[in-house]
Amino acid sequence: MPLPDADDGARASSGVVVSLRATSDGRLCVVFDDVRRQPAADALSWTHQRFFTATEYSSSELENLGLNKDQLAQIGENIIIRLLALSNASNPRGGYGAV
């Protein structure tokens, strides 16, 4: 599927932020947080709602893209499952459109 040429600015009311942070023992932690779009704001204004999950990896493994397919699939699966859960919580009939 080709990438869109321009951002239309439309977003759902909730989402997931994925960030990467170094731990004190030199590992890297992939952190997933739930966010909510601020009412009457543009697509760039989000507020943290809650921590969802986190997974640590060795720095070299992550930096060298050395994760195996199962580990990569787990990251993607966590994102999609959480987005579906957030969408269903805000609209039990499955509201995935922009609000």
Image (cartoon, rainbow, N blue to C red):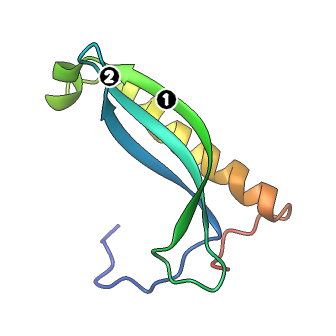
Spot the residue most to the front: 24
Q: Which mark is residue 23?
A: 2
Residue 37 position in % (x across, y down): 60, 70
Classify 58 as above or below 69.
above
Classify 78 as above or below 86.
above
Residue 14 vs residue 26, the one in the foreground = 26
Choose top left, top right, bottom left or bottom right for residue 50: top right
Residue 91 position in % (x across, y down): 81, 65
Residue 38 position in % (x across, y down): 61, 74
Q: Given the image, on which type of amino acid does mark 2 rest?
A: Thr
For label 2, the SS is loop
Q: Which residue is mark 1?
A: 54
Horizontal side of 92 relative to 99 (left or right) equals right
Residue 53 position in % (x across, y down): 56, 32
Q: Mark 1: few, some, or many residues within 10 Å (few <14, many ≥20)? A: some
Classify 10 as above or below 84.
below
Q: Residue at x 23, y 27 (%)?
A: 62
Q: Given the image, on which type of amino acid does mark 1 rest?
A: Ala
Q: Quadrant of the C terminus?
A: bottom right
Q: Residue at x 46, y 84 (%)?
A: 9
Q: Residue at x 45, y 74 (%)?
A: 44
Spot the residue most to the top: 25
Spot the residue most to the right: 92
Horizontal side of 68 relative to 51 (left or right) equals left
Q: Mark 2: few, some, or many residues within 10 Å (few <14, many ≥20)? A: few
Which circle, 1 or 2, is nearer the viewer?
A: 2
User: Which of the two labelled residues, at mark 1 and mark 2, occupies the earlier sequence position?
Assistant: 2
Classify 10 as above or below 15.
below
Q: Quadrant of the N terminus?
A: bottom left
Q: Residue at x 33, y 38 (%)?
A: 20
Horizontal side of 93 relative to 23 (left or right) equals right
How many numbered markers are drawn? 2
